[in-house]
Image (tube, grey):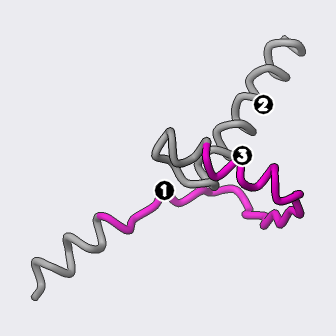
Amino acid sequence: MHEFRSKLQKQMSRKVSTEPIKRLNIELPLSEYKALEAYCQSRQETKRQVIRSFIRRLNSRTDKKLG
C-alpha cells in the first residue's frame, strides 16, 4: 500500500511557486470554449497548461521589447 501511495504522490506533485497565487475565471462563448478544448485534446494538454504556456510567452515577448 505504501508503494502505491508514493507512486500516486509522485504523479500528483506540482511545482510549488514562491510567488503568490491568483485565480483566474473567464467567461467564453461556447464556440471559443470548444476551440480551446479541441486544441488541448490535439496537444494532449490541459486547459490550464495551455493558458499558462500562452501567458509565459507573453511575458517573454514583453521582456524582449523592454530589454
Mark toward the start of the polypeptide (1 vs 2): 1
Give the amino acid at mark 1.
Lys
Residue identified by numbered label 3? 35
Boundaries of the magenta span: 11-38
State if disc 2 and disc 1 touch (CB < 8 Å). no
Q: Position of residue 36 (x, y in %)?
A: 69, 48
Residue identified by numbered label 2? 59
Position above or below: 67 against 14:
above
Q: Which mark is residue 65?
A: none
Q: Position of residue 63 (x, y in %)?
A: 80, 21
Report whether 37 appears left or right of 67. Answer: left
- Residue at 10% x, 88% y: name it: 1
- Residue at 12% x, 84% y: name it: 2
Q: CA distance from mark 2 to mark 3?
A: 23 Å
Report whether 19 appears left or right of 67. Answer: left
Disc 1 residue crowd, few under 14, some 14–19, many 20+, Cα 10 Å? few
Give the amino acid at mark 3.
Ala
- Residue at 81% x, 63% y: name it: 24
User: Who is closer to the viewer here, 60 or 28?
Assistant: 28
Q: CA distance from mark 3 to mark 1?
A: 28 Å
Q: Which mark is residue 15?
A: 1
Q: For the residue labelled by badge 2, is the local secondary structure a helix, a strand or a loop?
A: helix
Quadrant of the snapshot with the C terminus:
top right
Viewer-nearest of discs 2 and 3: 3
